[in-house]
Image (tube, rainbow, N blue to C red):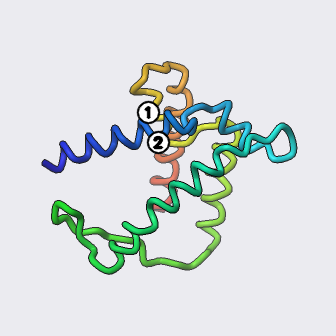
Amino acid sequence: MKKLAAFIFGSLFALGLLVSGMSNPEKVLGFLDITGDWDSSLIFVMVGAIAIAFIPFQKAIRVPKTVLGENIKLPDNRKIDRKLILGALLFGTGWGMAGICPAPAITLIGLGYSQIWYFVIAMLIGMLIHRLWAKS
């Protein structure tokens, strides 16, 4: 049942990424280009996503269980430190260069966009470097 629910909600999420334009690197780069020909349409997608997620997150704080009875582990670290800032800068730089981030990249793999593999391979190498660096 959990796998079926994950498949259904993952598919719904991927469909939302496609319909909203979040899987279109040109649209994302247009949104990030605030000094040029700025495409503000993704602000509505982001505000809508935050608004929709707000209520379930508030419920998860009060009752940390999913509908299927699984435990929800929300992060408890609220400090802004060097690691967080560096990670955000790296993520933002990659997003700005490629116009894509991990979830839309996986969506594009599922749609057969072969050129997305360059991004995914670079992302996996970055994750491996982080894992090795964090162990030392």
Residue 78, given in percent of the width and then of the height, sits at 52, 78
Residue 102, given in percent of the width and then of the height, sits at 50, 42
For the point 49% across and 33% down, the residue is: 18
At 54% from the left edge and 34% from the top edge, which residue is drawn? 23
Q: From the viewer's perspective, is 14 left or right of 50? A: left
User: What amino acid does circle 1 point to?
Assistant: Thr
Instruction: State the residue position of label 2.
Output: 103
Write down the quadrant of residue 85 in the picture. Answer: bottom right
Which mark, by number, is residue 91?
none
Q: Which residue is mark 1?
A: 107
Crowd around label 2: few <14 · some 14–19 · many ≥20 (10 Å): some
- Distance from disc 2 to disc 1, alpha carbons, whole Å, reads 6 Å
Mark 1 secondary-structure assignment = helix
Report the amino acid beneath label 2.
Answer: Ala
Residue contact at pointers 2 and 1, CB within 8 angstroms? yes
Which image quadrant for residue 88?
A: bottom right
Label count reads 2
In the visual, does 87 lie left or right of 37? left
**Closer-to-camera residue (19/77):** 19
On screen, residue 36 versus residue 39, left or right, reads: right
Residue at the right extreme?
35
Task: Name the spot of residue 66 as percent of width and height, x first.
Answer: 23, 64
* Label 1: few (<14), some (14–19) or many (≥20) C-alpha neighbours in 10 Å: many
Q: Compared with residue 62, is residue 92 higher up or lower down, i.e. above or below?
A: above
